[in-house]
Every structure is written in structure tokens, then in C-alpha cells.
Image: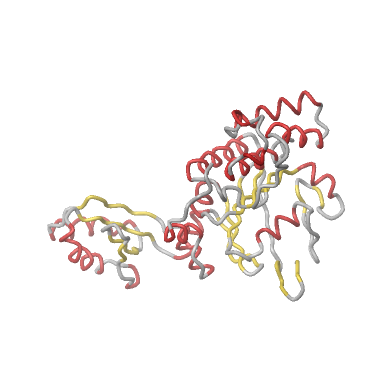
């Protein structure tokens, strides 16, 4: 439990991450994700309840918790008057690494995060994306067994975001446990072994990504006609096999998607397409997207959907 004045930021949140796995934590802005991370990282005290990180109590063994974790917040927090190398060496020295080991670890991380060419530049001369990557590198200097990544790819362009996904996968393959908060549902789908959804300070859902996708029921059949003129006939055809009377939906690129009960409808759909003389360029069956799940659970559109609509620019990396 955690309140700020009359506002309950957390109201009985229970998070549990399996060792060597990624726990994704999703929720709208103000849901309580960052508050939970700050409590787990010993930066904030809970009003009630207990929490353990790597086996250590965050209230009574805070020093041991801090030595067990790496933390990257929503905004880069590097020293802009130091070079990339100096920032990472400083962190290493604060973690009691010998000077030589600190320099070696700094060089290793700068190479890993594609910052080796900027190692001797002051951080204030880095782009926003470069500072973000340096901040992420700093959280890994001590090879922590538990890593908190609070919206770590905010400000990275799509290519660098995917590079960061590879970093997370490498950390997990080396045995680290990662708690990842994100508003990019594609990111959670790609990385998380399990996902907890928080809204208004409470956990409203927890499951694997595929398990959450089944929350709103059924599967999705998408068909793209080879000829645009066949679109109206395709909509009529798919209306006859829709699950629960849900109307077919256009996807903005000429395809039609409809909810279906199961893959048992596929032979019937193929037969109807053949009988109607409708040739197709695409025919696929899939689970709902996490975007649909997110909206169903929270009533809020995801960052992915908002970003797609606004065509917003990323901070250059």
C-alpha cells in the first residue's frame, strides 16, 4: 500500500517474478507502475505490506537489496559533465570494483551499447538516445541478478529499441531476473514471460501474454481480398461466421478481421471464398493483440496505438 495524500498510488499490489525470467508490468499513466518499482528499489517506503527482492526485505535489508539490483528509470540520470567511460567507471568504483576491473567493465558495456566511438565524449554532447543507452549501461555495471527497467526504451528509435530487446534477452539468458514496465505492448509481447496489468493502484490481470490475449475470447481471422472490388462481398461472407455476432472490422489496409470461435471455421471459410469467387492475398488466424487486451482491461488505448495515430517522432539515437 502507498498513498500520497488522499491519492492511493498502490492499493494491494502483488508482484512475483520467476528467477531468470522477464515480468512485464503494464498499465496506463498513473496506474502505479513506477511507484511499485521505486518501492522495490528502496527509493520509496511503502505505507503497508512487505516486499522481498533477491530474498532480501526492502525495509530491513535495504543495503543488500541495492547491491542485488540494477535500476533504469524513465529518464536518463547520467552525469553530463563526465565522459561515457567516466560515468561507468564511477559506478564501478561506487560498487567497490578495482579500478582496472571498472575500466574493463566500462569498455565492455560501451561496446555492447554501441557507444564505444563516443566513450571519450562528455555525456552532455550525447543525443537523447545515446544518454538513454548510457544510463541503461550504468545499471548493468555490477552484473546485478535483478534488474528493474522502468520504461527503458522511451526515447529510442525503433531500431535501437530492438537492440535493447536483444540486451534484455541476453541478460535473461545469463540468469538475470528482469522486471520491465512499459507502455509499448509490442515490447511486452516480445520480451515478457508473464505480464501483470495494474490500473488505479491494483492488479487487474496476470498471465502469460497468450493467456491475457484469451481474456477477451476467441481468435481473429484476417482476410485480404486480392481485388478491392470484392471487399463488400467479403464483409458479407465473414459476417456469417462471426463469433457472437461481432461485426467484421476493417484494418485500414483493405483487409477484414472477424472474431471466430476456433480454427474449426477455416474449412467453411475457404469453401465460402471459393464458392463466392473471392481470391485472397492474405488469410491468417491469430489471437487478439495485447492492444485489444489492454483496452478491454483498462478502457485506455496503449502507447503503441497512440503513437501509431500521431506518427510521433522518436528522439534520435
Residue 238 percent location from the top left of the image = 25, 65
What residue is at 65 percent from the left and 33 percent from the top?
A: 121
What residue is at 75 percent from the left and 45 percent from the top?
A: 54
Q: Which quadrant would the N terminus be assigned to in this image?
A: bottom right
Indicate left or right for 215 with 82 as reference.
left
What residue is at 57 percent from the left and 32 percent from the top?
A: 114
Q: With respect to residue 315, does 305 lie above or below?
A: below
Indicate left or right for 123 with 89 as reference.
left
Q: With respect to residue 165, does 89 lie above or below?
A: above
- Coloration mode: secondary structure
* The image quarter in which residue 273 lies: bottom left
Tag count in the figure? 0
Q: Nearer the viewer, residue 177 or 147?
A: 147
Q: Nearer the viewer, residue 121 or 15?
A: 121
Q: Which quadrant would the C terminus be assigned to in this image?
A: top right
Q: Nearer the viewer, residue 46 or 219?
A: 46
Residue at the far top in the pictured view = 100
Residue 37 percent location from the top left of the image = 70, 55
Residue 153 percent location from the top left of the image = 57, 48
Amino acid at each position: 500500500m502507498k498513498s500520497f495524500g488522499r491519492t492511493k498510488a498502490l492499493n494491494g499490489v502483488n508482484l512475483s517474478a520467476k528467477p531468470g525470467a522477464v515480468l512485464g508490468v503494464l498499465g496506463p499513466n498513473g496506474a502505479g507502475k513506477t511507484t511499485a518499482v521505486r518501492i522495490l528499489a528502496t527509493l520509496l517506503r511503502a505505507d503497508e505490506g512487505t516486499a522481498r527482492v533477491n530474498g532480501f526485505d526492502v525495509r530491513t535489508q535495504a543495503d543488500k537489496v541495492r547491491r542485488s539490483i540494477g535500476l533504469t528509470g524513465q529518464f536518463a540520470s547520467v552525469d553530463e559533465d563526465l565522459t561515457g567511460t567516466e560515468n561507468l567507471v564511477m559506478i564501478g568504483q561506487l560498487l567497490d570494483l578495482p579500478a582496472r576491473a571498472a575500466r574493463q567493465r566500462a569498455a565492455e558495456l560501451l561496446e555492447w551499447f554501441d557507444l564505444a566511438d563516443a566513450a571519450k565524449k562528455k555525456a552532455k554532447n550525447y543525443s537523447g538516445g545515446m544518454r538513454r543507452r548510457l544510463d541503461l549501461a550504468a545499471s548493468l555495471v555490477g552484473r546485478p541478478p535483478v534488474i528493474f527497467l522502468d520504461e527503458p526504451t522511451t526515447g529510442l528509435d525503433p531500431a535501437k529499441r530492438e537492440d535493447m530487446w536483444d540486451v534484455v534477452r541476453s541478460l535473461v539468458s545469463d540468469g538475470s531476473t528482469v522486471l520491465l514496465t512499459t507502455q509499448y505492448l509490442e515490447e511486452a509481447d516480445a520480451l515478457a514471460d508473464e505480464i501483470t496489468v495494474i490500473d488505479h493502484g491494483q492488479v487487474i490481470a496476470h498471465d502469460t501474454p497468450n493467456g491475457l490475449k484469451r481474456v477477451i475470447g476467441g481468435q481473429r481471422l484476417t482476410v485480404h481480398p486480392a481485388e478491392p472490388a470484392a471487399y463488400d462481398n467479403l464483409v458479407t461472407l465473414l459476417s456469417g461466421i462471426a463469433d457472437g455476432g461481432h461485426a467484421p472490422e476493417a484494418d485500414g489496409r483493405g483487409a477484414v478481421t472477424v472474431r471466430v470461435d476456433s480454427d474449426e471455421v477455416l474449412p467453411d471459410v475457404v469453401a465460402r471464398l471459393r464458392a463466392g469467387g473471392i481470391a485472397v492475398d492474405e488469410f491468417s488466424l491469430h489471437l487478439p493483440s495485447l492492444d485489444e487486451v489492454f483496452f478491454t482491461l483498462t478502457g485506455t488505448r496503449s502507447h503503441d496505438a497512440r503513437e501509431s495515430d500521431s506518427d510521433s517522432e522518436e528522439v534520435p539515437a
